[in-house]
Image (cartoon, rainbow, N blue to C red):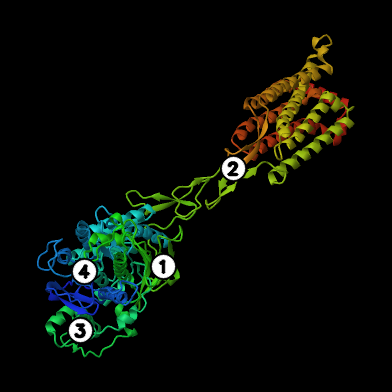
């Protein structure tokens, strides 16, 4: 029974840059359970046609000519993984019992035309490329594995989709291939770009890289994929400084310009999103120019393949990082590789080409010129003896540190095998098709195999679950590899992290930074930013005409903070808070008021206390010597009242010092205003009494009836009453109250007494000023009265001091805030009170205590007469 199983697409080789090419023939070989046809593959795709045949069936086919150049062991390893999987499946009785798998290989040589031609030959036969019509008598093609390159997979997938042939790629990651409207029969065992476009920006953020460059291939796959990566980086706050295109067909001059730009650019990290062969010439030129300090980040479209690069150019990748699809264990695969030998597969052209490259020898039966051309071996190379052997020392030859795409070609073969196994073991009336029918094993249709593939869910021999989602993608993770190259040229691919879309949020990316070796051999993460990060306390200010990653750091203004790195704007502190010196934290504002504990408040308090005691002492002196002429000369009762009011004026200063309270706020201006009004009223009464006494010297003068104690008491009473009325209205309408003033100073809170309606405060001051002015005028006019009444001179000078103090007080008071405003008012109270005390009472006290001989009526009268005679 002849049954078609599957076909696959891989690539073994790459297009050479040399003009010398060799004509290769794809040869057919049959070895027990599989058949291998191949050409020399250089980095393109090769199709592997796996026939689903019974043992003993021989497949015959006409040879197909292709032109290609060079052989690469890295690509050949992917084919060997498929061969290994085929042998492993054929040796597993539980999977496809009594059925053996076979395959054919075609090379695209990285050419879209060759890829399509090879595909059409599979679909229609070698002699006539008519899709849907197969001339050979071989079993019907079950499917295709491949292509490796997305740019070649796209046209193939369109053809396969139109004919409903299943296609599984082990390496094509182009996002659009997930669109089932365009590619209904395409599946892949690797994740698409979608997660990579999210994962790469996260990787950039992990290393704090915000300034990166990009190199993409000049085709739909490179440009569209590059734009997706760029958008992800920019959405995450990073910037792409440049996104340059490369192509295998670019001239050396154009590549040279690109290399010079990369060398001069400040970018330290460059993302490579193109097949590796596009980078070959660029890397050679970069090495010649000594550009070795860049960090290269390879996307999944770049296969890390040391074999295609010169040794010196390869060293440029030292310290680079690459994203490769997650790789699980393939048991005995290394053993299978080491068992390779031309004698095991005598008709396999790939084994012989591999042998010649691995041991730098040639087989004697082949033309030396052709072999040297195809394998780039020297004509003086030794002949292959056949006794060469592979061992663990060949591990580096096969580059076994990275089996990413190799593993996924292995799982692709298993996917076809499990799909066919499910198809064959289908029980009648339990099938997935109409009326529960199953597929006819003698006439299997490709769309039936596609149905089973889409609904596949199986485990590989290593235990990994494989299935395809609605978009035909196998959910898989990325490994992060670090390329570490020794000075001698040896290299290692070290797994340093993982990107897993199936992991819980926050754990989808893990990186062991300590395991990474960078290009300079250090473990210090390279710095790649356009502008250094703004520390807390600063904000970013974009530079006009430049990307958002290029900015200046501006310190936050007073009262604003930024408590994160690279803050876009500063945050304003709450009203009761203020920024600290570093502007990275809001702290509680200091509450300020005039206290007894600070020098200013303590000084004022001591001064007020001293002046109070001095005033009290003077009052005691005046009371003790109340019957002496100098005390009796100018109404001693008024003197007592004035001294008492001055003592209260000094004491009222204590109402202004200390924490404001509701009671003290009401009392401070009230007490101050009333006692000062009493003081000034007393002085006014004294002045008026002096004038009346002078006018009443004539016994018949009507002014004599105003002499006596009632007049001065009435003056003091009525003058004070008017001030009391002002306070009554003030307290009833807008009484003072304690307040936290947060507006006067931005950096602190002023705890003060809000005086309510300020007009009452100034009315109070204005009224006292009026009384003081009247007293000053009256005293000034009566300054030349007889000596017995010379107190008018003292009152004149005291009122001059009083008015001067309070006139100076107004601008000083208005120009200060907080505790200094209170201090100004207390200072004015003390100065004005001290001025009254000093000008009026100190001279009299001096006479009483120091010059008592002058405190006599005769002396006062004599002085008056002496003054009168002198005047005459």
Q: Is residue 104 left or right of residue 825?
A: left
Q: Which residue is mark 3?
A: 346
Q: Residue at x 12, y 83 (%)?
A: 369
Q: Of tags 4 and 1, which is closer to the observer?
A: 4
Q: CA distance from mark 3 to mark 2?
A: 89 Å
Residue 322's image quarter? Answer: bottom left
Q: CA distance from mark 4 to mark 2?
A: 74 Å
Mark closer to the chain start, 4 or 1: 4
Q: Of tags 3 and 2, which is closer to the observer?
A: 3
Neighbour tally class for label 2: few under 14, some 14-19, many 20 plus, Cα within 10 Å:
some
Mark closer to the chain start, 3 or 1: 3
Q: Residue furthest front?
A: 429
- SS at mark 4 in the image: strand
Q: CA distance from mark 3 to mark 4?
A: 21 Å
Q: Which residue is mark 2?
A: 576
- SS at mark 1 in the image: strand
Identify which residue, 581 or 388, lies in the foreground.
Answer: 388
| Labelled disc at residue 47 | 4
818 versus 213 height, above or below = above
Q: CA distance from mark 1 to mark 2?
A: 48 Å
- SS at mark 2 in the image: loop
């Amino acid at each position: 029974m002849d049954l078609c199983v599957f076909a696959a697409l891989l690539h073994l080789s790459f297009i050479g840059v040399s003009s010398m090419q060799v004509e290769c023939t794809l040869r057919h070989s049959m070895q027990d359970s599989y058949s291998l046809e191949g050409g020399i593959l250089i980095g393109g795709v090769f199709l592997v046609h796996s026939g689903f045949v019974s043992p003993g069936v021989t497949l015959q086919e006409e040879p197909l000519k292709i032109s290609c150049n060079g052989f690469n062991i890295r690509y050949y390893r992917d084919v060997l993984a498929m061969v290994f999987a085929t042998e492993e499946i054929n040796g597993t009785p539980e999977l496809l019992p009594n059925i053996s798998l076979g395959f054919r290989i075609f090379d695209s040589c990285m050419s879209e035309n060759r890829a399509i031609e090879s595909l059409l030959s599979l679909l229609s036969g070698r002699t006539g490329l008519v899709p849907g019509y197969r001339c050979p008598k071989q079993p019907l093609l079950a499917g295709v594995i491949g292509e490796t390159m997305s740019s070649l997979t796209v046209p193939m997938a369109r053809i396969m989709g139109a004919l409903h042939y299943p296609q599984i790629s082990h390496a094509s990651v182009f996002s659009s291939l997930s669109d089932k409207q365009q590619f209904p029969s395409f599946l892949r065992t690797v994740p698409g770009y979608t997660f990579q476009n999210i994962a790469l920006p996260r990787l950039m953020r992990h290393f704090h890289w915000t300034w990166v460059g990009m190199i993409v291939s000049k085709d739909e796959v490179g440009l569209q994929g590059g734009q997706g990566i760029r958008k992800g980086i920019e959405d995450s706050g990073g910037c792409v400084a440049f996104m340059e295109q490369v192509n295998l067909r670019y001239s050396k001059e154009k590549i040279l310009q690109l290399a010079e730009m990369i060398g001069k650019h400040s970018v330290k990290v460059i993302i490579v999103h193109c097949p590796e062969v596009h980078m070959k010439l660029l890397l050679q030129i970069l090495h010649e120019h000594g550009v070795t300090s860049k960090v290269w980040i390879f996307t999944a479209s770049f296969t890390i393949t040391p074999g295609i690069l010169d040794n010196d150019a390869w060293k440029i990748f030292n310290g680079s990082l690459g994203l490769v699809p997650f790789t699980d264990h393939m048991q005995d695969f290394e053993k299978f590789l080491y068992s390779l030998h031309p004698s095991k597969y005598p008709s396999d052209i790939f084994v012989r080409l591999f042998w010649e490259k691995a041991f730098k020898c040639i087989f004697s039966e082949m033309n030396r010129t052709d072999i040297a051309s195809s394998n780039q071996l020297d004509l003086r190379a030794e002949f292959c003896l056949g006794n060469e052997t592979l061992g663990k020392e060949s591990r580096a030859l096969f580059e076994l540190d990275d089996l990413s795409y190799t593993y996924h070609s292995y799982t692709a073969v298993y996917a076809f095998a499990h799909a066919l196994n499910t198809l064959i073991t289908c029980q009648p009336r339990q099938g997935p098709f109409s009326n529960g029918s199953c597929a006819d094993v003698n006439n299997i249709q490709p769309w039936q195999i596609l149905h089973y593939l889409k609904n596949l869910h199986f485990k590989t021999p290593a235990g990994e679950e494989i299935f395809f989602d609605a978009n035909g993608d196998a959910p898989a993770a990325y490994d992060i590899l670090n390329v570490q190259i020794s000075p001698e040229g040896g290299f290692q691919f070290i797994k340093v992290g993982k990107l897993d879309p199936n992991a819980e949020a926050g754990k989808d990316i893990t990186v062991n930074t300590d395991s990474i070796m960078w290009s300079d051999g250090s473990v210090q993460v390279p710095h790649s930013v356009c502008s250094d990060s703004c520390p807390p306390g600063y904000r970013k200010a974009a530079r006009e005409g430049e990307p958002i990653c290029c900015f200046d750091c501006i310190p936050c203004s007073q009262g604003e903070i930024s408590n994160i790195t690279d803050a876009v704007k500063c945050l304003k502190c709450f009203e009761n808070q203020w920024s600290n010196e570093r502007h990275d934290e809001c702290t509680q504002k200091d509450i300020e008021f005039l206290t007894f504990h600070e020098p200013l408040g303590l000084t004022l308090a001591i001064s007020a206390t001293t002046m109070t005691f001095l005033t009290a002492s003077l009052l005691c002196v005046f009371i003790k010597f109340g019957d002496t002429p100098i005390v009796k000369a100018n109404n001693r009762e008024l003197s007592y009242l004035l001294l008492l009011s001055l003592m209260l004026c000094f004491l009222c200063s204590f109402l202004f010092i200390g924490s404001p309270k509701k009671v003290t706020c009401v009392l401070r201006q009230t007490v101050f205003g009333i006692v000062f009004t009493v003081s000034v009223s007393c002085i006014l009464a004294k002045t008026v009494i002096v004038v009346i006494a002078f006018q009443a010297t004539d016994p018949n003068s009507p002014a004599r009836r105003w002499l006596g104690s009632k007049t001065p008491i009435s003056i003091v009473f009525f003058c004070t009453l008017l001030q009391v009325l002002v306070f009554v209205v003030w307290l009833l309408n807008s009484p003072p109250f304690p307040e936290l003033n947060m507006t006067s100073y931005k950096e602190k809170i002023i705890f003060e007494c809000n005086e309510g309606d300020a007009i009452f405060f100034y009315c109070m001051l204005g009224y006292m000023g009026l009384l003081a002015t009247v007293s000053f005028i009256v005293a000034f006019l009566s300054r030349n009265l007889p000596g017995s009444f010379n107190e008018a001179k003292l009152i004149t000078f005291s009122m001059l001091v009083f008015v001067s103090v309070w006139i100076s007080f107004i601008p000083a008071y208005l120009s200060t805030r907080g505790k200094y405003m209170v201090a100004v008012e207390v200072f004015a109270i003390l100065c004005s009170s001290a001025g009254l005390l000093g000008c009026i009472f100190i001279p009299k006290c001096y006479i009483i205590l120091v010059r008592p001989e002058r405190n006599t009526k005769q002396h006062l009268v004599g002085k008056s007469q002496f003054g009168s005679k002198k005047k005459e």
